[in-house]
Image (cartoon, helix red, strand yellow):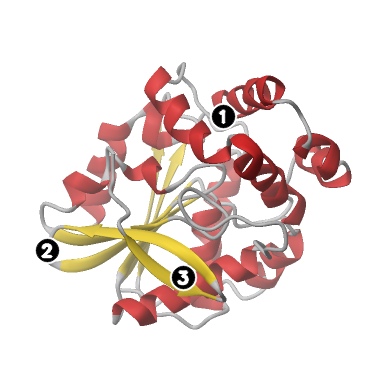
Amino acid sequence: MLELSERFSFKGHSIAWGAIGDGEPVILIHGFPWSAQAWRNIAPWIARSRKVYFFDMLGCGQSDKGEDQNVTESVQSDLLAALVSHWGLARPQVVGHDFGGLAALRGHFVNGLEYSKLHLINAVAILPSGSPFYAHTAHHEAAFAGLPDYAHEALFQAYIQNAAHYPLREEAVKVYYEPWSGPVGRPAFYRQIAQSDTDHIEQAQKRYKATEFDTHLIWGVRDTFIPVEHGRQLAALVGAKSFTGVPNAAHIVHEDAPEALVGCLLRGM
């Protein structure tokens, strides 16, 4: 497990983060409904030659969760920009998965961050985006937030299993479920879904162009959340230097094919 022992104050909220290794900086950004622990089997390998930073997005993992939080995509990219400044990093390498990929893209195209390299993994990045489950939950957030624990746990496990090609290990399910459980975590899960807004994707997508730094895309080709065709379209929009499809991996490549993901990242670094 990754240790997130550091805290950063962002708009009055506590953000959990950690770092391991030495060398050129690399920032790993998780997506939803994951946490920094999505990188627990990836970060130690990258840290053999780099200093690796990781954090839990606002409202996720060990970071603060609360009823009045704004956890939209624009806030998460603002958080990334604030952390880069806090860490004193100039042109770090950035790796983003899912909504973490959108945070990285918004960080550059909206917030003006400069990277040395960018790696995007099954990123939420282009329209159309969203699912019937997201739309339904957004209209009935309070009802979902009030589910009894056993019903919420069953729904959550079904949701994350749909993100994987192979059956998720019990350890992985526990790691991902724990932050979203109980009277604080359960409503936080549905809050993230309800506040998701495609306008934030559209704002970034309108600005996409070939990046001056190398951009690499890695995609689990069995992803049923974001099809591989979207990945190839994104690669063309940002002038990606490479596009690597990972066979027999779905949306959460970290769990389906961690060795392949490590290999792709190290090769691109």
Q: How crowded is mark 1: few (under 14 residues within 10 Å), some or many (20 or more)?
A: some
Q: In which quarter of the image is the C terminus?
A: bottom left
Given residues 236 and 247, the one toward you in this image is 247
Q: How crowded is mark 3: few (under 14 residues within 10 Å), some or many (20 or more)?
A: many
Q: What residue type is labelled 1?
A: Ile
Could you tell me how far apart the alpha carbons at marks 2 and 1 are, in whole angstroms?
Answer: 33 Å
Whole-percent x, y for residue 141 in the image: 82, 44
Q: Which amino acid does label 3 sit on?
A: Leu
Could you tell me how far apart the alpha carbons at marks 3 and 1 are, in whole angstroms?
Answer: 25 Å
Given residues 231 and 102, the one toward you in this image is 102
Tag of residue 160: 1
Residue that numbered label 3 is attached to: 80
Q: What's the residue at 54%, 75% (across, down)?
A: 78
Could you tell me how far apart the alpha carbons at marks 3 and 2 are, in whole angstroms?
Answer: 21 Å
Outermost residue, right direction?
139
Q: What's the residue at 32%, 54% (across, down)?
A: 4
Q: Quadrant of the N terminus?
A: top left
Residue that numbered label 2 is attached to: 22
Tag of residue 231: none
Taking the image as shown, residue 54 lies to the left or right of residue 74, namely left
Q: Residues within 10 Å of mark 2 (few under 14, many from 20)?
A: few
Q: What's the residue at 59%, 43% (across, down)?
A: 229
Given residues 263 and 37, the one toward you in this image is 37
Q: Is tag 2's residue or tag 1's residue first in the polypeptide sequence?
A: 2
Give the secondary structure at mark 1. helix
